[in-house]
Image: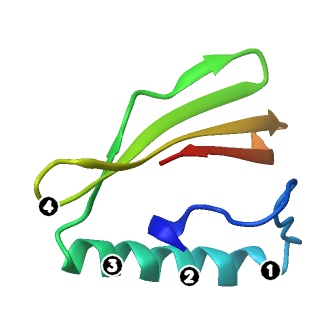
Amino acid sequence: MPYGSPEGPEPGTTYSRDEIPGFLGKIIGLRKEYEAKGITLEYGEPIEAADKVVLEFTVNSPEGKVLDRAVDIFTIRDGKIAVKDVFRKA
């Protein structure tokens, strides 16, 4: 699986509230692996529109080549993330 991008048929994996801490731990571990290899994540400025927050980012090789591009769209309810949609393009 390249650079943590989702695989498989849509709609992907949905995590329950109890599963989220383990998932986040896995993502943090993956980020540490990237950093050890010189792979970086570069984030754009968050864009807010109504109940959505859009966050664009790239995954970059040590030489600066873009390995993966992504946009995460968060739906916010009562100040909390209710839904996170992930869109990736390598």
Looking at the image, is mark 2 or mark 4 nearer the viewer? 4
Q: Amino acid at mark 2?
A: Gly
What residue did someone put label 2 on? 25
In the rendered image, which quarter is residue 75 located in?
A: top right
Marks 1 and 4, how far apart at CA: 32 Å
Q: Tell me the distance, in whole angstroms, between the alpha carbons under discs 1 and 2.
A: 10 Å
Q: Give the residue type that dot 1 points to.
A: Glu
Q: Which residue sits at x=86%, y=65%?
A: 14
For the point 48% across and 68% down, the residue is: 2
Q: Secondary structure at mark 1?
A: loop
In the rendered image, which residue does mark 3 sit on? 32
Which is more N-terminal, label 2 or label 3? 2
**Which numbered disc, 1 or 2, marks the residue that appears first in the sequence?**
1
Identify the residue position indicated by label 4 in the image.
62
Instruction: Quickly name the residue at label 1.
Output: 19
Q: Nearer the viewer, mark 1 or mark 4?
A: 4
Closer-to-camera residue (55/60): 60
Identify the disc placed on residue 57. Answer: none
Does residue 8 appear left or right of residue 41 in this picture? right
**What is the x, y in percent for residue 62?**
14, 61
